[in-house]
Image (spheres, helix red, strand yellow):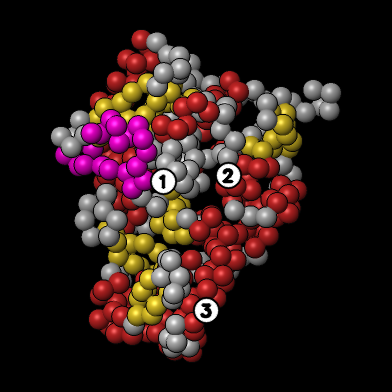
Amino acid sequence: MGDGRRHIGTAERRDRLALRQRLAGPFRAGSPEEVAGSLVALHGTDPATVHLAVGARLADAAKTVGGTERALYEEGTLVRMHGMRHTVFVFPTELTAVVHASTGRTVAAKERATLLKNMAEAGAPDAAWLTEVEESTLAALARRGQATAAELARDEPRLKERFVYAAGKRYEGVHTVSTRLLKVLGVEGKVVRGRPLGSWTSSQFRWAPAPPHPELDPAKAQAELLRRWLAACGPATEDDLKWWTGWRVTEVRRALAAIGAEAVSLDEGTGYVVAGDAGPVAGPAEPWAALLPALDPTAMGWRQRDWYLAPELRPMLFDRSGNVGPTVWWNGRVVGGWAQRADGEIVWRVLDGAGVGHEAETAVAAEAERLASWVATTRVTPRFRTPLERELSA
């Protein structure tokens, strides 16, 4: 390039994805902690996504459920908490302070202010009352270790208090203090999601005290989070970075400068990598396939996705809110989707226009068998249904 920037083309971006997202066979991980560390964050809004994302990347997929539950609920090396864009993720526990300082504080202040405003509008008790309930709730949770909202409400009955939200409006509803307060405490980094009440697919969960962490400088925390994410997902555009973090563009630019990020040329325009990462990256020696779950961090990792997802395939693979469903990958691009039927069978389809042959279909079939071998009798239905997933699972 005339400006001295190295151009990183689509083929190399897909090679980086295979290696750094732990998708091609030789690059698969040995533990859930390795998977989460490589990806920085696993989407945790749908509980099943975490296990399915880990299983797709473990060298020994049979260890998926046991290993992930050990990391989350026994050893505490992974934690499920609110993070970027007010979304629940699973992070390495060492990143708790970084995530909280870089993204959580700003969102938390807004959440608490909104809760107090909604309560005042409904004639509910004031901020001093809420502070008393909060302190009592956190004390009860500390005594119990882990607890459901209902269990905490037995210890602190004021959590059962109800108030009308948006009275007189089309979306009027009744909220309990427990639902709203626990959400605020989660965003503030005081509580995290604990072990579910059912299996690893259950969306009913317990709360637990957040692991202790120091209060970091927000700008330094943003720089560290951006550095880790670019190491895993770079190159990425400024638009990708703003979307993934949920930060203002000024914050993204400040963090890029703080880590000395290198600018490179992409088909989409200017991209960025961490310092020293602009050189060529060797990809897998053999072709590879993967079956990734709904909301997988690879499928959702960038805002600009044309380099791995053809626009004409998107309508079948996303819901109306922009949530991706289960996807089939071949050599670094999305070529179709998959689902599980009521009898447990894993079914998949390569979409028209994907342009793959027999070798790809054979590899995808092998990945489907691999997935079925560890999912076994568990039934998985994505929280956000997409057209192709609904069609395949019917």
Residue in the picture at 56% in, 70% down: 110
Quarter placement of the C terminus: top left
Q: Position of residue 376 (x, y in %)?
A: 19, 36
Instruction: Give the mark nearer the N terminus: 2 vs 1.
Output: 1
Q: Mark 1 or mark 3: which is in front?
A: 3
Q: From the viewer's perspective, tell me whether residue 69 is left or right of residue 9.
A: left
Q: Residue at x 21, y 56 (%)?
A: 198
Question: Which mark is first along the chain, 2 or 3?
Answer: 3
Camera sees residue 28: no
Q: Which residue corresponds to the image point at 54% horizontal and 58% vertical from the top-left?
A: 99
Q: What's the magenta region? A: 371-394
Marks 1 and 3, how far apart at CA: 40 Å
Type of amino acid at the residue the image marks with label 2: Trp
Name the residue tied to disc 2: 229
Which image quarter holds the N terminus? top right
How far across and how far down the image is residue 257, in percent?
75, 48
Q: Are marks 3 and 2 in contact (CB under 8 Å)?
A: no
In the rendered image, the residue lying farthest to the right is 2
Q: Counting residues from the N terminus, which is met first, the one under dot 1 or under dot 3?
A: 1
| Numbered circle sitting on residue 33 | 1
**What separation in Å lies between label 3 and label 2 (alpha carbons)?**
35 Å
Residue ID at (25%, 75%):
151
Q: Is residue 299 left or right of residue 53?
A: right
Q: Secondary structure at mark 1?
A: helix
